[in-house]
Image: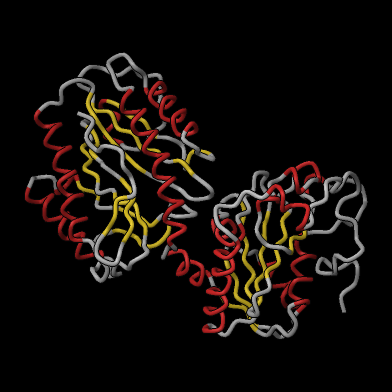
Amino acid sequence: MTTTESPFSTAVGRPEMPYGWGRVPYAYEDRLPWRNLPFPDEEYEARIARLNELMREAELDCVVLWGDRADGSNIRYLTNFEDFYGGQTIVVISVDGKVGMTTNAVMHGEPMHSGIQDAWPRDIRCAAAPRTVTGSASAVTVLNHVADFIREAGSVTAVGLVGPTPTVIDDLIADVAPGASTARADDLLARMRTLKSPLEVEVMRKACSIADAGLIAGMGAVAPGVTEFDIAAEANYAMFKAGAEHPSFPIAVVTGERSGFKHMAPTAEPIKGGDLVYIDLGGRYMGYYSDCSRQTVAGEPSPEQLRLMETQIDIVEAVMAAAKPGVAIGDLAKIGVGMAEETGYAENLYFRGHGIGCHTHDRPSIAPGNPVELEAGMVFCFEPMLVKFRFGTACWEDIWHVTPSGVERLNEAPYRFW
């Protein structure tokens, strides 16, 4: 039997932290007026129902899902909670549809200062960030709340683990559900996130429009004498004006010979006439990412610069014309690789792409040899880049949605800026 000294004892009747906790109430009714979600509750309820189906197939009574600042994409997908502070967030889902969430990503001892009002689940139990707890108080931890969620789930004999769960979670399950087996269940969420709902596609279309604004502004700023910092500043400004929560990742702006490295941080290096200029950026909107690239030349492109850029566009257009449900990704790659060989760019082609959604990299992986077939509902970035060392990068990268009959480009920005 657990005691109050156990790390897995109940949180009932114990202090969350020794001082200043929760002066602003955060019960469900208190959060409702402040919520800002991308979807109606029914979208999240459908996700839980789908997860429950997969749990039953895997013979799991309960799933414990762990997220943190390194990767909170599953948390955002299921709850819409975003960790602004740096902590641990755990969601416990029982096979009967009960959802409990706990987090210690709490600033100032106030969940309502920490974005908790944007989280969807009704049952949210917070704990203070460990670095804010002082004195000798035995403050409640997220482990106490997780233990309570599992106890309240009833008879638990099989638990699925999702995310980078530490070994203490195994100890917790052994303590509160003796004899219960554990198994990795990451694939359940990965499978769910591979196919986007119509509502998700529309949110991602907005994320793409944010990237479009950045691309147009960044490419529009290219001129001799302008620095890489100047281009990055214009692109980031445009994305925030267009509605970005924040950039998807640190922006890459490279010019001249540096553009042959593709992904590098901007510098004070001024652009010279004739330089090839490459930019890779994205903006996140309501938890969903965009990731897009463009290139141009400061002035008139040379014949070889023009051939590099136009060949890359030809590859994108040919491969996407063949893309549709049922086509294997490896077969699509053969089209791009063949075109690179025919044009003399075989050594310069990096045939790449990746699914995108609540993370910059979801399934599917767009790579040679991948036997996975496209399915309607997939959304992916396509970036078959031609990269020549000390010369430059040509990469039109946009986001594509697989429809029942083909693919739909979600971006609208031009892909020629010359």
* Residue that lies at the very extreme toward the top in this rendered image: 225
As rendered, which of 71 and 325 lies closer to the eye?
A: 325
Residue at (31, 61) in percent of width and height: 402
Image height check: is 231 above or below 416? above
| Horizontal arrangement in the rendering, residue 65 relative to residue 262 (left or right) | right
Whole-percent x, y for residue 121 in the image: 68, 62
* Residue that lies at the very extreme toward the left in this rendered image: 342
As rendered, which of 235 and 353 lies closer to the eye?
A: 235
Whole-percent x, y for residue 75 in the image: 59, 58
Q: How is the image coloured?
A: secondary structure
The answer to which image quadrant residue 319 occupies is: bottom left
Image height check: is 216 above or below 176? above
As rendered, which of 129 and 379 lies closer to the eye?
A: 379
As rendered, which of 87 and 192 lies closer to the eye?
A: 192
**Count of numbered circles on the image:** 0
Residue at (54, 68) in percent of width and height: 47
Please identify the quadrant where the C terminus is shown: top left
The answer to which image quadrant residue 74 occupies is: bottom right
Whole-percent x, y for residue 245 in the image: 54, 40
Please identify the quadrant where the N terminus is shown: bottom right
Whole-percent x, y for residue 81 in the image: 63, 53
Image height check: is 167 above or below 408? below
Residue at (18, 50) in percent of width and height: 317
The answer to which image quadrant residue 161 occupies is: bottom right
Residue at (88, 66) in percent of width and height: 12
| Horizontal arrangement in the rendering, residue 20 relative to residue 224 (left or right) | right
Image height check: is 368 above or below 10? above
| Horizontal arrangement in the rendering, residue 387 relative to residue 241 (left or right) | left
